[in-house]
Image: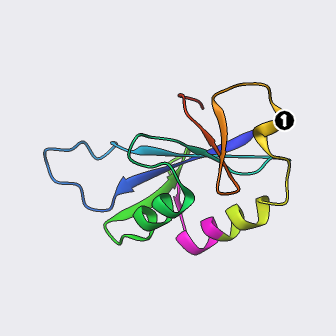
Amino acid sequence: MGTNYYLRLKNPPKSIPETFKAHIGKSSCGWRFLFKKYLEIQTFESWKKLIEDDAYIIVDEYGDEANKEDFFAMVAWKQKDASHEIVEDPHYINIGGYDFLSCEFS
């Protein structure tokens, strides 16, 4: 069991649906936080820079807003958990010590 997290515009323009969001990744019990890898976002640092932008908020899969400081603390705390590298799947990638998945997941 886990929780998915998404990045959403704080005040989206009328041309963008309020429900539009980008999948940041998933927190699962016993595993490191698993980041979604995009062509434009391929490192923890690139996710962090985007998340820290005041134009965005983090929401979980239930629609609840997550505090950014708490989110980063959770990611740091989960770094001690098992890496997804032990799963034999070429889509799991460790980049700079953080786990990423290069395909869609939930």
Residue 4 horizontal side relative to residue 15, left or right: right
**First to last magenta residue range:** 64-72
Residue 94 horizontal side relative to residue 64, left or right: right
| Residue 21: % across, % down | 38, 45
| Residue 65: % across, % down | 50, 60
Which residue corresponds to the image point at 48% horizontal and 58% vertical from the top-left? 47
Which residue corresponds to the image point at 40% horizontal and 62% vertical from the top-left? 50
The residue tagged 1 is 86
Quadrant of res 87: top right
Q: In which quarter of the image is the N terminus?
A: top right
| Residue 104: % across, % down | 53, 28
Which kind of residue does numbered mark 1 sit on?
Answer: Ile
Residue 33 horizontal side relative to residue 53, left or right: right
Q: How many marks?
A: 1
Which type of secondary structure does the marked residue at label 1 adopt?
helix
Viewer-side residue, 85 vs 51: 85
